[in-house]
Image: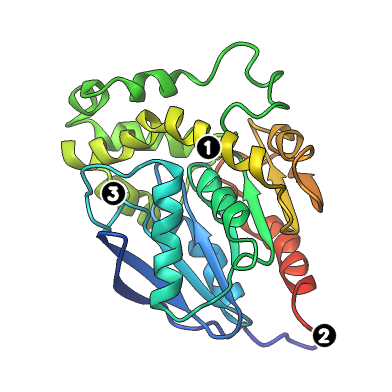
Amino acid sequence: MIRTPPLQTAPIELRQIETNGIRANVAIAGSGPAVVLLHGFPHTWRLWSEIIGPLSTHYRVIAPDLRGFGATSRAPDGYDATTLAADIAGILDALGEPTAAVVAIDAGTPVALLLALRHPDRVPPLVVMEALLGALSGAEDFLAAGPPWWFGFHAVPGLAETVRSGHEAQYVEWFLTTGTRGRGVRADIRDAFVDAYTGEEALRCAFSYYRALPASARQIDHAVAADRLTTPTLAIGAHPVGDALERQLRPIADTLAGHVIPDCGHIIPLDRPQELLNLITPFLAADQPA
């Protein structure tokens, strides 16, 4: 029997990078063309724990904790998509990366979209997952019964962090279990997420993303009114968003592919990491020179 040698992955380095008035905690691994990974709620860069290693064999992987999350600055404001996109552009500048593929999920997706719309020369390919983009048409069926309950709960200033303080572990666990269709995530990753979201200030920052959604939606509307999405884009869905994100992007994108992963929860990188790699690896490679 021929044994395949184990995949040699690069070590992960954590760096603190000054960008756009904050200090971002950034996980970096590997060398080659840059790939930026943007997480959502309730995650940190460790959402990509199963993805960074395989990608680092061919790419320089850059996975920040977004503004207010994890070990990145607990900023008082700036949780709209425009400001967050400027955070990421600043990280790329600090690392000397003029271009980078961007892979984003959930709250990271509006950030990635604005970065690609406003700086198409900097984002050669774009991968977005399990999110909705403001008021863009295409998600009407998904939103027929209204947005998920936590959107309204998180949006009320001061409410959710007061109610959830002291119960962060149970709250985060609910999202992790629901987001993997009951399968859950590794204990070390769960514990890291719980730690990152413990305390009223950590919760305030997390819920600020929801409070900034109206501003982010306006920014997306203005951006798509001015420019088309020219970056080759892959939209990946699972449960519950499905193909709603693809439908939103279809009218504004020049080159768009879509795929829905069956029997996969919202937290795709932890629920079905191999299926995700099977999709994004050839898509990223297609943008590289032969």
Corner quadrant of residue 252 = top right
Where residue 105 sits in the image (x, y, percent)? Answer: 55, 48
Q: Is residue 133 visible?
A: no
Using the numbered discs, state the Cα–Cα distance from disc 3 to disc 1 in whole angstroms: 22 Å
- Any mark on residue 220, and which? none
Label drawn at residue 179: 1
Looking at the image, is mark 2 or mark 3 earlier in the sequence? 3
Residue 157 in the image, given as x and y percentages of width and height: 25, 23
Q: Secondary structure at mark 3?
A: loop
Q: Which residue is mark 3?
A: 68
Toward the viewer: 98 or 246? Answer: 98
The residue shown at (33%, 52%) is: 67
Q: Is residue 232 above or below residue 156?
A: below
> Does 47 sit above or below residue 3?
above
Q: Amino acid at mark 3?
A: Gly
Image point (31%, 60%), residue name: 20
Q: Are marks 1 and 2 in contact (CB under 8 Å)?
A: no
Q: Nearer the viewer, mark 3 or mark 1?
A: 3
> Which badge, 1 or 2, comes first in the chain's sequence?
1
**Residue wearing tag 2:** 290
Q: Is residue 286 left or right of residue 237?
A: right
Q: Is residue 61 above or below residue 171?
A: below
Is residue 73 or residue 145 the one in the foreground?
73
Amino acid under disc 1: Gly
Q: State the separation of the CA atoms marked 1 and 2.
A: 37 Å
Q: Earlier in the sequence, mark 3 or mark 1?
A: 3
Disc 2 to disc 3, C-alpha distance: 39 Å
Type of the residue with mark 2: Ala
Point out the image quarter for the N terminus. Answer: bottom right
- SS for callout 1: loop
**Quadrant holding the C terminus:** bottom right
Tell me the crowding category of disc 2: few under 14, some 14 to 19, or many 20 or more residues within 10 angstroms, Cα based: few
